[in-house]
Every structure is written in C-alpha cells, then in structure tokens.
Image (cartoon, grey):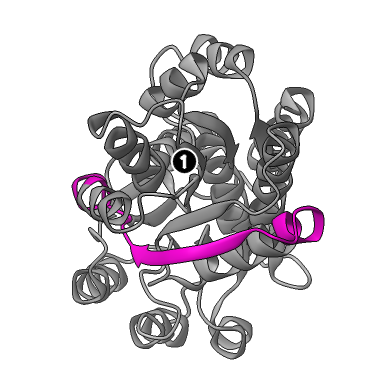
C-alpha cells in the first residue's frame, strides 16, 4: 500500500487549489455518485475532504444516481441549470450516459469521470479527465493472487464462478485481466458460471444458486464489493467455509473483517474511494482553470490485500468504515 505516495498526491492537490492563480474565484462543482455506500461513500468523503482543503469557497452539489441512467440524466440537467462549473461523475453506462454528458459538454461544462466512463470515442469527445485505477491491472492482480493460492493448494484445475457487475465496461475488463493472469499460471483453471450480482442481496441469492447448481465450485471471483461480500455470505450460509474461497474487489469494513478471518475471502484488490474522489476533484479544478490532463486518463494506485494481517491493518486505518 503506497500511503506515502497518496499523501504526496493529496498535498499537490491542496497546493494547486490554494495557489494564487486558482484562488481567484469561488467554485461550484456537481458530483454524481452511482451508489450511496461502500466505494462511493469513500469517493464522496474524498471529494468533500478535498473541497474543504481547497483554500477558497468550493460548493459541492451532490446527487446519487442509484445505478439508474434516467436519474443520472435528470441530475445532470439539474446541475447544468444550477450553473455548476464542472461535473464529476461515475457514468452508469458506457453507451447510455453519453447524451446527458454531451449536453453538459455542449453547455461548456467540463465533465470528469472517475472509476467508470464512456466508450473510447465518446470519452475523447466529451470528457475532460478520467480518474481511474486501470481495470485490467485490477483484475490481473487478483488473478495473480488466486493463482498463488491454487498453486499452494496444489489445485491445477480449479472451477471458478464469477459474480459480475458487467453492465459497466470496467467490470468486463476486470474479468479479462483476472482470467488472463490466473490462466497464465494455472492453465487448467475454468470459469464455470458468470452471472450479474453487483448488489449485495442479489449477489447472495445468485451465489447460493451457483453453489447448488455447481457443487464442485472451488472459488468465486467477485468483480465489485457487493459481489465479493455476497459470495462470502453465500459460502458461509451453505456451510462451505474452508471448502470454497472468494477473491474479490473493493474493500469495505465487512470485507476487511472477512479477510481478517481468512477462512473464506483470501484476497481483495482495491482502489481507495477517498483517494480517487480527491483525484477526481483535483482534475475538475484543473479543467475549470483550463489545464485538463493530456491524454484524458489519470491513473490511480491499485492495492492488493492477501492476508489476515492485511485485513486487520485496513480496519485500523479506516476506523470510520469509509473506504
């Protein structure tokens, strides 16, 4: 975990925000979250923290799209009417969100993506910056961790079920990275099921059905936080702790507690919500002041947690429970 690098990055953000050139006017920025908890709660705290440290009045107008493209569209229109100078958003759909984002762009409002974004062509046309932890690397690091586990367990043909969030392209890319890294080291590994289960309650139900239909499953890959925790709960509810393991994305308090126990969740890959929120607001301020990044994408670090001690350390560092 590169906490030093993150601290330095945040210091640069604050220094930029408090420089004389940037402090000439107050700002109003719209922020749209895809959800209100877990990772997106961390993004919200990161944006709020960076706003408070900006050294000038910075009004954040916040909304929650609840994973709904139509709500997202309505919120973007409201932000345009409210006169925001930039919009920070994790688009619900790579293809379905572009119309509303285009309206903001056409109104002269720079749009900054974080975590998810539009397809490549629309991103180049309508997006000022994209703060992201590379999704292929995200999946690849988890695939490496899974491979290490199976090799240590002498399982050369593990059967894996995937709980996905592939209504967003980021999660498709995460799976591709996971599969490539895992099968490079454990070529006999096989994906035996892949179903949507991003929301916790649905993830528990889908994972339970998978376990009933495929009693010889060795592991789950949860592409996002709800999927990861849902798989772990399903494994426990069916009395398969110690037999079926989980590799997943996105740290939360409950996921860190499961990793600390280490009987079901064996590894978690994570992008700090707070850190990504700070980075996204930094890019919004830069875009307002006419200095967006070259190449649009701005990379953020990806962390891997692979032990009980890692889980305990995360819990200690996030006593407030916000990732």
- State which quadrant residue 183 falls in: bottom right
On screen, residue 171 above or below 77: above
Note whether 140 is above or below 48 in the view shown: below
Residue under numbered circle 1:
47
Residue 170 located within the stretch drawn in magenta: no
- Residue 171 in picture, x, y percent from top left: 50, 64
For the point 46% across and 73% down, the residue is 109
Residue 244 appears anywhere in the view: yes
Q: Does residue 111 appear anywhere in the picture? A: no
Horizontal placement of 291 versus 44: left or right?
Answer: right
Residue beneath the point at 45% across and 79% down: 94
Residue 314: percent from left, percent from top: 55, 18
Residue visible at 48% across and 39% down?
246
Q: Residues within 10 Å of mark 1 (few under 14, many from 20)?
A: many
Q: Is residue 310 above or below residue 18?
A: above
Query: Is residue 195 shown in magenta?
Result: yes
Q: Secondary structure at mark 1?
A: helix
Q: Nearer the viewer, residue 60 or 275?
A: 275
Q: Which residues are magenta?
A: 181-204
Q: Which residue occupies the foreground of this view, 4 or 20?
A: 4
**Figure check: 167 above or below 14:** below
């Amino acid at each position: 975990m590169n906490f030093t690098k993150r601290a330095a990055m945040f210091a640069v953000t604050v220094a930029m925000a408090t420089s004389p050139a940037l402090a000439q006017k107050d700002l109003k920025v719209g922020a749209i979250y895809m959800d209100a908890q877990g990772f997106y709660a961390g993004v919200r705290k990161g944006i709020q923290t960076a706003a408070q440290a900006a050294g000038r009045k910075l009004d954040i107008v916040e909304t929650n799209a609840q994973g709904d493209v139509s709500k997202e569209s309505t919120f973007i229109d409201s932000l345009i009417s409210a006169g925001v100078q930039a919009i920070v958003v994790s688009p619900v759909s790579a293809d379905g969100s572009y119309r509303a984002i285009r309206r903001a762009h056409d109104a002269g409002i720079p749009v900054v993506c974080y975590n998810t974004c539009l397809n490549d062509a629309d991103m180049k046309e309508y997006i000022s910056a994209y703060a992201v932890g590379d999704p292929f690397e995200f999946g690849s690091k988890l695939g490496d961790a899974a491979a290490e586990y199976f090799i240590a367990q002498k399982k050369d043909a593990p059967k894996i079920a995937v709980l996905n969030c592939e209504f967003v392209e980021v999660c498709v890319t995460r799976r591709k990275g996971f599969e490539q890294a895992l099968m490079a080291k454990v070529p006999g590994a096989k994906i035996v099921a892949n179903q949507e289960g991003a929301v916790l309650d649905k993830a528990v139900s889908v994972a339970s059905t998978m376990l009933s239909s495929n009693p010889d499953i060795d592991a789950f890959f949860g592409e996002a936080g709800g999927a990861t925790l849902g798989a772990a709960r399903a494994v426990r509810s069916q009395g398969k702790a110690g037999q079926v393991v989980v590799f997943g994305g996105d740290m939360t308090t409950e996921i860190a507690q499961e990793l600390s126990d280490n009987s079901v969740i064996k590894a978690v890959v994570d992008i700090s919500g707070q850190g990504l929120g700070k980075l996204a607001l930094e890019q919004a301020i830069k875009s307002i002041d006419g200095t967006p990044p070259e190449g649009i994408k701005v990379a953020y670090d990806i962390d891997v947690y692979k032990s009980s001690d890692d889980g305990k350390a995360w819990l200690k560092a996030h006593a407030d429970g916000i990732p």
